[in-house]
Image: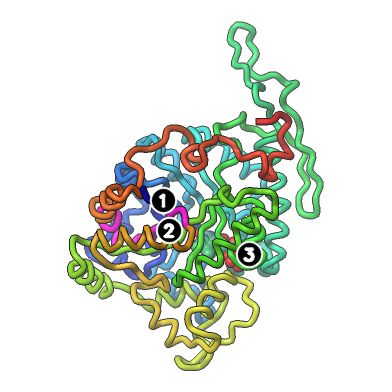
Amino acid sequence: MNKEIRLNAFDMNCVGHIQQGLWTHPRDQSCRYLELAYWTDYAKRLEAGLFDGLFFADVVGVYDVLGASPDAALRGAVQVPVNDPMMLIPAMASVTQHLGFGVTANLSYEPPYLFARRMSTLDHLTKGRIGWNIVTGYLDSAARAAGLSGQSGHDDRYDLADEYMSLVYQLWEGSWDDGAVLADRLRGVYADPSKVRLVQHQGPQYRVQAMHLSEPSPQRTPLLYQAGSSARGSRFAATHAECVFLNGQSLPGVKAIVDSIRRQAVLQGRAGADIKVWLGATVITAQTDAQAEEKFDEYKRYASSEAALVHAAASMGIDFAKYDIDEPIETGKSQAIVSNVDAMTRSAGPQWTRRKLLSQMVLGSRQTPWVGSADRIAQQLIDWSIAADLDGFNLSRTVVPECFDDLIALVVPRLQERGAYKTAYTPGTLRNKLFGRDRLAASHPVAQYRRQAV
Ligand SMILES: Cc1cc2nc3c(=O)[nH]c(=O)nc-3n(C[C@H](O)[C@H](O)[C@H](O)COP(=O)(O)O)c2cc1C
């Protein structure tokens, strides 16, 4: 029996997500992102493959760092146009029973009181299958759209996020006691007012005096994802996250980050196993290695390196257009995704150039695909999960939906044969499926806001 591997599909409510340019492939269907039937069909496919979830990225700004212009992003559909991921969830939940939904929401521009209610609503409608990827944003264009002159500093955003979390925890966990809802038709009493109280919060960024508007939902606090792995980002993750999402190309590099997050969680009084770590991966598979390589070559013809550069520039906060192709890039102190800059420097050395970056972007992003027969891919997933202490993989799409169909038809049975993948879902909420409990553990900071012990 091998360690169990969990799989999420990684996508976004837009045309070009990670592997840029592949929307031009004749079999790719991502241009159908405006159709509800596209998403409901997608959810059903993933559930048939026993995926744990569909994880949605999101941004609330545009990629205008490269050449200081959004034109290339618009031309190449690089995460723009982009629609709200939350709106897709109820439709997909209505055609599935088990699939979880991780949704990215940027807390910097969301009033906590309203956001907490939207997540509770989704937790109710999905019967506890909602997760939240906590992000603070990395785009000045998003800050300007919100009426600010630019983003606050990288670490300051995490300070704000800590306060935000304490406030939404109070709304989700501290406002309504268990048992507050009576729904007693005979007495005509829906809720017991003595069991519902105001949250009183006065902090440096937020002031709220309010009761939570939603009644307690199955998980109360949604399953918490986080994807920052800078020093400050991993401290935040160790405090709050239940699932951490990492990118990385080198096994020792990934292992070092995983170890550091688990160590920090223990220092904060949590168990290392209270955090499940997911690695971003792109897989191209077929019956044989040769057929998989053939498919890879075919996909490559549709990848766009211009679009990939647009994405990389925005996520690292560096305008590569200012550099000649072989001129070393000045990374400085990034105010965008520090871990992406660090990962590039780790893989290419401190003197990396635009040419080096482009050479890594074989399929429209820096994420090098794993290409091979189902046997080879299944073994690679198992080897990485053991060697780097990973719990699962967030699988980026290539040509969609065939990339997931291939994986489900070919790789999932190989994993099952090796005892590394479930053959049926565990019933219940998303948290119950992953951690065997509906509510966050008593060692999580959420617990201090609960009136009653769980
Ligand atoms: C794998 C991965 C996925 C991410 N997805 C998103 C996203 O969808 N939306 C977003 O605004 N930020 C996203 N981020 C950014 C981070 O969540 C984080 O808030 C921020 O950029 C700081 O990260 P750092 O601590 O690594 O510097 C992602 C980061 C990583 C590493």
Q: Quadrant of residue 171?
A: top right
Q: CA distance from mark 3 to mark 1?
A: 42 Å
Report the image quarter containing ligand 1.
bottom right
Q: Is mark 1 within 8 Å of ligand 1?
A: no
Q: Is residue 142 visible?
A: no
Q: Verify CB contact (< 8 Å) between mark 3 and mark 1.
A: no
Q: Is the residue 363 above or below the residue 418 in the image?
A: below
Q: What amino acid type is highlighted by mark number 2?
A: Ser
Residue under the image location 58 percent in, 10 percent down: 185
Q: Which residue is mark 2?
A: 385
Q: Is mark 2 within 8 Å of ligand 1?
A: no
Q: Is residue 131 visible?
A: yes
Judged from this view, the residue extending furthest toward the front is 1
For residue 143, which numbered disc appears in the image? 3
Q: Earlier in the sequence, mark 3 or mark 1?
A: 1
Residues shaded magenta: 390-405
Dot 2 falls on a residue whose secondary structure is helix
Q: Which residue is mark 1?
A: 3
- Where in the figure is residue 116, as x and y percent of width and height? 62, 42
Q: Verify CB contact (< 8 Å) between mark 2 and mark 1.
A: yes
Q: What amino acid type is highlighted by mark number 1?
A: Lys
Dot 1 falls on a residue whose secondary structure is loop
Judging depth in this view, the residue of 117 and 277 nearest the camera is 277
Residue under the image location 71 percent in, 57 percent down: 160
Q: Is the residue 23 above or below the residue 40 in the image?
A: below
